[in-house]
Amino acid sequence: MIINNILRFCKSTIVHCFFAFVMVFTVSSCSNDAEVAEEEIVQEEEVVEEETEEVPEPDEEVVVEEEQVEGVDFFLPNINLSNWKVTLPIGSPDEVEPPEIVDYATDERLLPYMYNDSLDGSLVFYTSPGSSTANSSYSRTELREQMVPGSNSTNWTFTEGGRMKGTLSVPEITTDAGGDFHRTLVMQIHGRLTNAQRDLIGEDDNNAPPMLKIYWQKGKVRVLTKKLKDLDATDEEILHTDAWEDNEGHTFSENIGNNTFTLEIIASDGRLEVILNETDSVVYEDIHMQKWSVFENYFKAGNYLQTLDAGASAKVKYYELEVTHE
């Protein structure tokens, strides 16, 4: 009987436990279903809100102009023109002196003969046959040194010394009827008579011969200097242009073609040196250089085209140019 009571109690307990479990599961399932349904409703509401949200119109694009940087966006030549004047192949011929020459980039007189090429940082000298100076039949776009800006009267002697160095190229030059390139003068040392010397020999100007002429010739650099025809000439006879003649000249072996190259001229007492690309040089140190010491001098640089052929032209580019005197 005791066992029967125990069995009845266990059955009753199991039944109650089963119903309790079923109730808990049912409530939990309903709760979870309700939460899922609520999340779905919320998501649907968010989707509806996203779909109906107005898209703002894009702001108008603002273009900011960046400042150009020299050496990055454009390039300028490293040349100070404060002590140079330029002679042009136009007019009688026309010349532009300091300080006006400093504004060459905006001076209509100088275009298209002298201008910047901002792609490679060069100062371009363009010339073709046209006007010439009194002592020449050829045209030029060429700089003339002025130790005192605006004046040709102050110059230097070899005893005082002078140095000019330039980086340049000849990218364009025409050919003659035979297909050979024309030639052009790119650097000079030109002599000058003092007023007293001019009056002594009865000349009507101060012109004296050029002691040094440097040509671009057939893709190479050719150097010419002067020598006395008569070493026994008097001090007065030496002052005449016809007392001097060109020497045999020197042509550097390097073929520079249209490439950029460096030229340096060093003049000192009784001595003249020309250096190409800082490695190859020619030196003149003789009686002719000693005799030349009677003259004043000035440097010249640019494009002095040596032809009268119709349609001829040349461009000489200078990237750097500097002159110093001791």
Image (spheres, grey):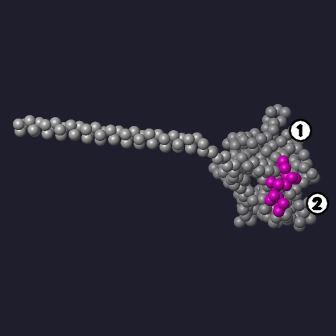
Magenta part of the chain: 98-113
| Residue 310 disc label | 1
Left or right, residue 238 beside residue 281 = right
Q: Tell me if residue 116 is in the magenta stretch.
A: no
In percent of width and height, residue 4 lies at 8, 36
Which comes before the other along the chain, label 1 or label 2?
A: 2
Q: Tell me if residue 104 is in the magenta stretch.
A: yes
Among the 4 quarters of the image, the one containing residue 82: bottom right
| Residue 183 disc label | none
Which SS class for mark 2?
loop
For marks 1 and 2, give the one nearer the viewer. 1
In percent of width and height, residue 235 lies at 84, 62
Amino acid at circle 2: Asp
Q: Is residue 204 visible to the viewer in this orientation of the structure?
A: yes
Q: Residue at x 79, y 62 (%)?
A: 83
| Residue 204 disc label | 2
Work out which residue is located at the far top of the displayed protein and give it. Answer: 178
Q: Residue at x 11, y 36 (%)?
A: 7
Q: Is residue 272 visible to the viewer in this orientation of the structure?
A: no
Q: Residue at x 33, y 41 (%)?
A: 27
Left or right, residue 164 beside residue 200 = left
Which SS class for mark 1?
loop
